[in-house]
Image (tube, rainbow, N blue to C red):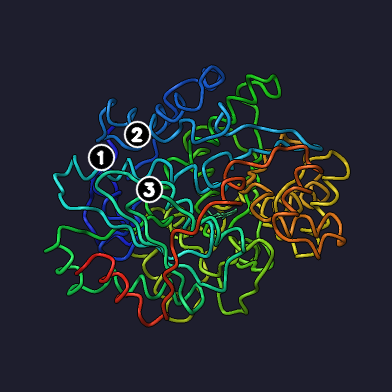
């Protein structure tokens, strides 16, 4: 079955998977979606015998139908290798009454590695397939996690380069250190005097600047984006939900055909959308539990059918979920609107004009598989402490939002379905918040002292990603005002 990609807003033509990956966003401003969702190419119980790479291949080949077997296997082999610190790539750990799907064993210890390890290879392969020449320059604004994962993914990948902008005073000490020590001749990291929105706006402006694009082209470059609206980030995320189902069968926890719940700590709606696609392909799912932090736009959306971003932006201890516009929700809207591009377009126009929209009753009926919950700061911290206290297992703040929501879900519903919680970051990435949750006596310690204490408490060795940055030299010290981002790009690329 050959799958083509079309825009959620219905006004761009159909493209192949590789073209969609190269383009990122469709020309009409919509997001690319597959024209039909593939079905699982194997029986459920056959999943139990497949390792991560084998699962990745059988699932991704369904979505990326214009890639040859050799091309796709090459991308998978380059991505899921010993950059991951365990053979399973995405291991399952049981703690309390849930299974934690650890998605943080890659180079930068956050779940973004699952997709950003393979995206650079999908992109360079796509460029070759479409005879696109020139060096691909990735421009990214980051609030912390995406930047480092993208840097690690693109570092020294031939035919690519990457420039990351981050808010100089808006990321954690560990996040900044991870970025400014990044190796690779093709990597550039720039701190800006401004916040994350300024960084994002500056990057978007450059993407929209045709005069700049023309000068880039003269010098043999083309811009591309690594953010989560790219279908090349979504497809690799479908894999681990399916892989996990197979693992649960292999471990004797479920029989093929039994339903499971997935709980996903959500920001941009990319990770949970991948779970929704896994269900559409044939994985038996009871509920997809969407967990928000205090920025609970999605909770309100599932409760009322109205998406409303007109509210205060709250800084929380789970910063990667501090988001008021969940871009990937557009793909779900398109699906529940009966794949109607005009209808989706209208909702998105309302969102950009007035900051809100309300879906119809018949669309609401399509949302039955979702359960929305949220977890405030106190409950997040209490959940970390409680799970540590009862099982010795330490989770990060984002995962704790999900675990807190699951506890409430279970109390409300009495549902005993086997449940998998997506564990999106290593606790070492958010050491200070995690340690403070366990005991406030840690407040006066430095970040690296806390790292050592966490290792003693959790009995998990300090990951290489953290060990490295203790002593690694700072390789990037560019800082600029938010108004001078383009000047910095021109300087770096000698335009
Ligand atoms: C990005 C991120 C999330 C949110 O994922 P979405 O796909 O944006 O919903 C959750 N946790 C962590 C640690 C992240 O880095």
State the residue position of label 2: 75
Secondary structure under tag 3 reads loop
Residue 112 located left or right of residue 97: left
Q: Which quarter of the figure has residue 401?
A: bottom right
CA distance for labels 3 and 1:
16 Å
Secondary structure under tag 1 reads helix
Residue 213 rendering spot, x and y as whole percentages: 19, 68
Q: Residues within 10 Å of mark 3 (few under 14, many from 20)?
A: many
Q: Furthest-left residue in view?
A: 218
**What quarter of the picture does the C terminus occupy?**
bottom left
Q: Are marks 3 and 1 in contact (CB under 8 Å)?
A: no
Question: Which dot marks residue 65?
Answer: none
Q: Residue at x 66, y 21 (%)?
A: 255
CA distance for labels 3 and 2:
15 Å
Question: Which dot marks residue 125?
Answer: 1
Q: Quadrant of ligand 1?
A: bottom right
Mark toward the start of the polypeptide (2 vs 1): 2
Q: Which quarter of the figure has residue 378?
A: bottom right
Front one among 363 and 392: 392
Front one among 454 and 398: 454
CA distance for labels 2 and 1:
8 Å
Front one among 312 and 191: 191
Q: Residues within 10 Å of mark 1 (few under 14, many from 20)?
A: many
Q: Residue at x 53, y 47 (%)?
A: 108
Mark nearer the viewer, 3 or 1: 3
Q: Residues within 10 Å of mark 2 (few under 14, many from 20)?
A: many
Front one among 241 and 445: 445
Residue 262 located left or right of residue 118: right
Question: Which dot marks residue 155?
Answer: 3
């Amino acid at each position: 079955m050959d799958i083509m990609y079309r825009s959620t807003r219905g006004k761009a033509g159909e493209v192949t998977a590789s073209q969609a990956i190269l383009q990122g966003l469709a020309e009409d401003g919509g997001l690319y979606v597959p024209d039909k969702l593939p079905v699982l190419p194997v029986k459920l119980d056959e999943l139990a015998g497949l390792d991560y790479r084998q699962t990745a291949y059988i699932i991704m080949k369904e979505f990326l139908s214009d890639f040859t077997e050799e091309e796709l296997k090459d991308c998978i082999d380059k991505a899921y290798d010993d950059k991951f610190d365990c053979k399973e790539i995405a291991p399952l750990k049981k703690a309390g009454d849930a299974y934690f799907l650890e998605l943080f064993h890659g180079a930068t210890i956050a779940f973004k590695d699952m997709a950003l390890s393979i995206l650079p290879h999908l992109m360079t392969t796509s460029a070759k397939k479409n005879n696109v020449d020139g060096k691909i320059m990735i421009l990214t604004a980051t609030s912390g996690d995406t930047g480092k994962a993208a840097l690690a993914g693109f570092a020294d990948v031939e035919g690519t380069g990457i420039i990351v902008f981050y808010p100089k005073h808006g990321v954690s000490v560990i996040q900044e250190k991870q970025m400014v020590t990044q190796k690779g001749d093709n990597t550039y990291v720039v701190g800006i005097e401004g916040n994350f929105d300024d960084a994002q706006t500056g990057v978007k402006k450059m993407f929209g600047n045709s005069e700049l694009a023309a000068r880039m082209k003269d010098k043999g470059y083309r811009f591309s984006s690594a953010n989560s609206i790219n279908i090349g980030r979504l497809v690799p995320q479908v894999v681990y939900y399916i892989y996990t189902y197979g693992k649960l069968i292999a471990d004797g926890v479920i029989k093929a055909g039994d339903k499971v719940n997935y709980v996903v700590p959500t920001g941009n709606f990319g990770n949970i959308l991948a779970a929704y696609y896994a269900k559409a392909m044939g994985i038996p799912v009871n509920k997809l539990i969407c967990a928000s932090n205090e920025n609970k736009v999605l909770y309100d959306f599932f409760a009322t059918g109205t998406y409303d971003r007109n509210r205060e932006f709250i800084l929380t201890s789970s910063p990667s979920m501090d988001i008021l516009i969940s871009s990937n929700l557009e793909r779900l809207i398109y699906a529940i609107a009966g794949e109607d591009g005009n209808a989706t377009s209208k909702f998105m126009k309302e969102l950009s004009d007035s900051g809100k929209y309300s879906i119809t009753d018949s669309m609401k009926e399509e949302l039955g598989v979702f359960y929305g919950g949220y977890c405030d700061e106190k409950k997040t911290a209490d959940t970390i402490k409680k799970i540590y206290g009862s099982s010795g297992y330490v989770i990060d703040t984002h995962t704790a939002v999900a675990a807190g929501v699951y506890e409430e879900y279970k109390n409300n519903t009495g549902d005993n379905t086997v449940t998998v919680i997506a564990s999106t970051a290593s606790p070492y990435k958010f050491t200070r918040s995690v340690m403070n949750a366990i005991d406030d006596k840690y407040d006066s310690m430095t970040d690296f002292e806390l790292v050592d204490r966490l290792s003693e408490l959790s009995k998990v060795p300090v990951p290489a990603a953290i060990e490295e940055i203790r002593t690694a030299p700072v390789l990037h010290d560019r800082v600029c005002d938010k108004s001078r981002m383009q000047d910095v790009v021109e300087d770096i690329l000698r335009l």
